[in-house]
Image (cartoon, helix red, strand yellow):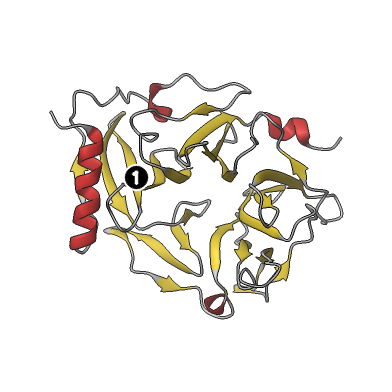
């Protein structure tokens, strides 16, 4: 039987040399039993654990893990040695089993699961799959964006890397509210971490908190959270603690739609990136009383 990493590699090759979405059935006897969401794993506690060894977390690097709102699809960016590009892989839950893997356009899933945001572009969910790439339009089409996430109200939160090449480099988190069907001119989110570099924001669907990573110019990144105050302002940035943040970079945080689990990417000493998950109860523990 072919190993699952070979199946994924084949999918990546097909992606590079053909058009459209490619699918590959998972029928490998070595593939772990996927009898329920989260791959039948025992949920983690307050200590982060590697997510789905041999399925998601392999000898290759991963980044930007995210479940669909109904928890029936799991998306992650997969890096495969020897291929020029990474691709977003989805594992799909059907008939009470995780039954197949397929490559889909990379992106950040909207709270209703209907849009994949790809920087300053997006794709829409259709009956036949994801649509072609579309532009978010002005003024976003002129802003280089690494990660954009949206709230249930349609407010965009994103990192603006247009000044990253400056000395010193600057990366702001900006937001744009949806007002009368149109997005307003982006504003800068005022949250101080003591650095000029803030990346990869994840906004809670109700906009009650925002999680992002921040770093010094020549340092490693840590994950932070800021809570929205009663007056609508944002509270002081709070580090997520040494159970999540390590001496190396910890980035790309997100919370599942049920609010139970926090996912993030941890960098190891050998440079490999692991997908981690942990009980999200720490979020309420950090919320100022």
Q: In the figure, 178 relative to 32: above or below?
A: below
Q: Quadrant of the N terminus?
A: top left
Q: Whole-percent x and y of residue 176?
A: 66, 68
Disc 1 element = strand
Q: Which residue is mark 1?
A: 90
Q: Is residue 281 left or right of residue 277?
A: right
Left or right of residue 250: residue 95: left
Q: Position of residue 147 (x, y in %)?
A: 54, 59
Q: Position of residue 268 (x, y in %)?
A: 51, 36
Instruction: Give the residue drawn at x 50%, y 73%.
Output: 136
Picture quadrant where residue 189 is located: bottom right
Front residue of 198 and 36: 198
Q: Is residue 159 visible?
A: yes
- Residue drawn at 47 percent across, 44 percent down: 66
Using the image, determine if residue 262 lies above or below residue 251. Answer: above
Q: Is residue 160 above or below residue 249?
A: below
Q: Nearer the viewer, residue 169 or 289?
A: 169
Query: Which is nearer the eye, 153 or 65?
Result: 65
x and y percent of residue 158 in the render?
61, 62
């Amino acid at each position: 039987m072919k190993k699952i990493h070979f199946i994924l590699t084949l999918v990546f090759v097909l992606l590079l040399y053909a058009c459209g979405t490619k699918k590959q059935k998972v029928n490998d006897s070595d593939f772990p039993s996927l009898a329920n969401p989260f791959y039948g794993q025992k949920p983690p506690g307050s200590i982060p654990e590697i997510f789905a060894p041999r399925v998601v977390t392999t000898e290759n690097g991963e980044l930007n893990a995210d479940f669909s709102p109904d928890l029936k699809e799991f998306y992650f960016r997969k890096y495969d040695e020897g291929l020029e590009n990474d691709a977003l892989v989805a594992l799909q839950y059907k008939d009470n089993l995780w039954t197949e893997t397929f490559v889909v356009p990379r992106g950040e899933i909207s709270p209703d699961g209907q849009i994949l945001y790809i920087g300053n572009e997006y794709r829409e969910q259709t009956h036949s799959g994801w649509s072609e790439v579309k532009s978010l339009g002005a003024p976003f089409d002129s802003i280089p964006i690494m990660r954009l996430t949206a709230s249930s109200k349609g407010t965009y939160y994103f990192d603006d890397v247009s000044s990253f090449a400056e000395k010193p480099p600057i990366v702001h988190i900006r937001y744009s509210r949806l007002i009368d069907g149109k997005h307003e001119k982006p504003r800068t989110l005022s949250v101080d971490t003591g650095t000029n570099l803030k990346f990869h924001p994840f906004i809670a669907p109700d906009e009650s908190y925002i999680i992002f990573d921040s770093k010094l110019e020549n340092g490693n990144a840590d994950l932070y959270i800021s809570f929205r105050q009663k007056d609508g302002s944002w509270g002081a940035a709070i580090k997520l603690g040494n159970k999540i943040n390590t001496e190396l970079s910890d980035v790309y945080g997100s919370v599942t739609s049920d609010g139970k689990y926090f996912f993030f990417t941890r960098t190891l000493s050998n440079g490999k990136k692991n997908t981690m998950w942990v009980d999200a109860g720490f979020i309420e523990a950090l919320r100022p009383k």
